[in-house]
Image (spheres, rainbow, N blue to C red):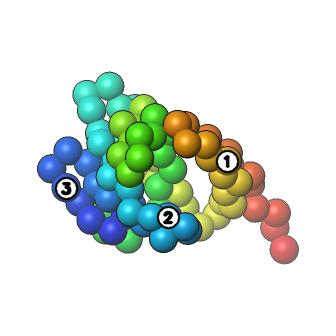
């Protein structure tokens, strides 16, 4: 979840209680725009170095999808799994 908007991107807080700085560049893909706000849930594709991620792509996540996330020390991979209707 986005916890803070900064000049070149934003800061997210993840489930591990880590604060990660997300850097948006001119090469970052934003398929639905960059109208991010504090409290938004997002998916970030990028390269991680400690608590800093240079984003290759960012997309807001709606409540109509579930996430399965796999992370490593250098790269973050996240996959969407559509939620089944109840």
Residue 57 can be seen, yes or no: no
Query: At which x and y percent is residue 25?
Result: 27, 32
Query: At which x and y percent is residue 76?
Result: 56, 42
Q: Are marks 2 and 3 in contact (CB under 8 Å)?
A: no
Question: Quadrant of the rendered structure where residue 58 is?
Answer: top left
Viewer-proximal residue, 59 or 49? 49
Q: Are marks 1 and 2 in contact (CB under 8 Å)?
A: no
Q: Secondary structure at mark 3?
A: strand
How crowded pointer 3 is (Cα within 10 Å; few <14, some 14-19, many 20+) is rated as few
Mark toward the start of the polypeptide (2 vs 3): 3
The residue where tag 3 is placed is 6
How crowded pointer 2 is (Cα within 10 Å; few <14, some 14-19, many 20+) is rated as few
Q: Which residue ends up furthest to the left in the rendered image?
A: 7
Question: Quadrant of the rendered structure where residue 86 is?
Answer: bottom right
Q: Is residue 78 above or below residue 65?
A: above
Residue for point 48% across, 70% down: 17
Residue for point 82% across, 63% down: 84
Q: CA distance from mark 2 to mark 3?
A: 17 Å
Mark toward the start of the polypeptide (3 vs 1): 3
Viewer-proximal residue, 78 or 66? 78
Quadrant, the N terminus: bottom left
The residue where tag 2 is placed is 14
Query: At which x and y percent is residue 5?
Result: 23, 60
Mark toward the start of the polypeptide (1 vs 2): 2
Is 57 placed left or right of 80 in the picture? left
Q: Give the label on residue 26, or none.
A: none
Q: Secondary structure at mark 1?
A: strand
Query: At which x and y percent is residue 61?
Result: 53, 57
Residue for point 55% across, 67% down: 16
Q: Secondary structure at mark 2?
A: loop
Q: Give the label on residue 70, or none.
A: 1
């Amino acid at each position: 979840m986005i916890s803070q908007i900064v000049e070149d991107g934003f800061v997210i807080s993840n489930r591990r209680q880590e604060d990660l700085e997300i850097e948006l560049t001119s090469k970052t893909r934003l398929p639905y725009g960059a109208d991010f706000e504090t409290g938004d849930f997002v998916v970030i594709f990028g390269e991680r170095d400690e608590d800093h991620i240079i984003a290759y792509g960012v997309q807001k996540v709606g409540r109509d999808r579930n996430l399965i996330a796999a992370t490593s020390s250098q790269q973050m991979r996240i996959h969407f799994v559509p939620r089944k209707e109840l």
